[in-house]
Image (spheres, grey):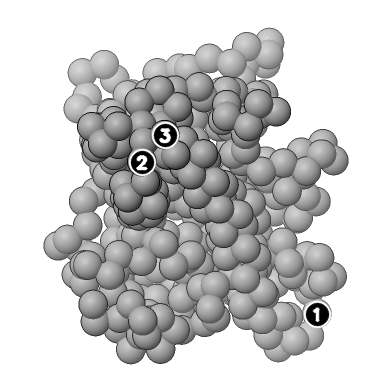
Amino acid sequence: MKVDGIPYRSIFTAADGRTVRVIDQRRLPHDFVVVDLSTRDEAAVAIRDMWVRGAPLIGATAAYGMALQMRTDPSDAGLDEAWRVLNATRPTAVNLRWALDVMAAVLRPLPPAEREAAAYARAAAIADEDVAINRAIGEAGVALIEAVAARKGGGPVNILTHCNAGWLATVDWGTATAPIYMARERGVDVHVWVDETRPRNQGASLTAWELAGHGVPHTLVVDNAGGHLMQHGKVDLVIVGTDRTTARGDVCNKIGTYLKALAAHDNGVPFHVALPSPTIDWTVSDGLAEIPIEERSGEEVGWVWGRTAAGEVTRVRIAPEASGLGNPAFDVTPARLVTGLITERGLCAASPEGLASLFPERAGR
Ligand SMILES: CSC[C@@H](O)[C@@H](O)C(=O)COP(=O)(O)O
């Protein structure tokens, strides 16, 4: 997508073809800064400390982290260590493990001297595939928005989204936002309710920034506003992303997603989840019991970052020093609350049968 008119991906290589460049998402929306990752450990820090985030981009960064490792130590031991170090960065998004497994499967059979070139080629392919997948998700999902527009016969289609499942969370297009960007391109009147997404505020800092950059009408709301908006008929459709979807269609996404699904269910609002197939974890079924939920530092809850009226970007404390601070970063929405899944192969029910109908080669394995 574009930043100030210039097309960008969220991850790419520098002119040397080896240095990896990412947008430092901690600095948005105040500053747009591209940073270089030159070592495997820098890639690991970028994922762990959320310079990059969002399941598909975490996967792509891990793939390039593996390539960075191959520059300095392409041995079997180096390969194993890179897998271990990168896989330990964040626990919930399954795209991380998926990308590392894809890279390891390509690299392990090769002699070490050939691994660096192969690693960069495969990492680039993972990034390109992500762009194609998200474009296909957009093409599948735009039909949902167009159907609402046709039914309403006028006025904007109001879509609520949570966290950032936009182009910044992927390599390009986004998952939840791809249908929105495409609807906009086709001239459909859309308006997006953007949940701020405490504590990291991915909605306020990233989704709102993205949508503003592409002229998509949107309104930033506090996380707790969604139920009220739905009760008053102000949400036509919810579309969110996911960090891990189980084989039976349970969906793990940013904390607070479950509450939006409950409110949508109670108010008869369709609740859709957009996902690239690498986000499906075919090895797990019961999302509540089986998906590891990242517990992040309470510092993120006790403090907020922002820009002061004087222009300084700083953080301020909002909780008493004496209070305990809890920070579960994701929750699981059971399949029964999900109206449908939007994948690169089309729409399906959030059920074992629904997923199997689109991915017969993976189901039941
Ligand atoms: C297409 S991104 C889907 C999810 O990764 C996204 O909704 C999300 O929860 C991101 O969490 P984050 O903690 O910012 O990595």
Q: Is residue 38 visible?
A: yes
What is the x, y in percent for residue 50? 44, 32
What is the x, y in percent for residue 313? 59, 16
Q: Are marks 2 and 3 in contact (CB under 8 Å)?
A: yes
Q: Which residue is tagged 3? A: 113
- Please tell me how crowded label 1 is: few (under 14), some (14-19), or many (20+) other residues with Cα within 10 Å: few
Disc number at residue 111? 2
**Residue furthest to the left:** 289
Check disc 1 and report its element: helix, strand or loop.
Answer: loop
Q: Which residue is tagged 1? A: 154
Q: Nearer the viewer, residue 67 or 108?
A: 108
Q: Quadrant of residue 310?
A: top right
The residue under the point 37% across, 46% down is 110
The amino acid on which the numbered mark 3 sits, given as a three-letter code, is Ala
Q: Nearer the viewer, residue 234 or 86?
A: 86
Check disc 3 and report its element: helix, strand or loop.
Answer: helix
Q: Nearer the viewer, residue 344 or 260?
A: 344
Q: Quadrant of residue 80?
A: top left
Q: Nearer the viewer, residue 27 or 362?
A: 362
Question: Is tag 1's residue or tag 3's residue first in the polypeptide sequence?
Answer: 3
Q: Which numbered disc, 1 or 2, marks the residue closer to the eye?
A: 2
- Residue 303 position (above or below residue 224): above
Image quadrant holding the C terminus, namely bottom left
Query: What is the C-alpha distance between the residues marked 1 and 3?
Result: 61 Å
Question: Is tag 1's residue or tag 2's residue first in the polypeptide sequence?
Answer: 2
The amino acid on which the numbered mark 2 sits, given as a three-letter code, is Pro
- Please tell me how crowded label 3 is: few (under 14), some (14-19), or many (20+) other residues with Cα within 10 Å: few
The residue under the point 46% across, 35% down is 116
Query: What is the C-alpha distance between the residues marked 1 and 2?
Result: 61 Å
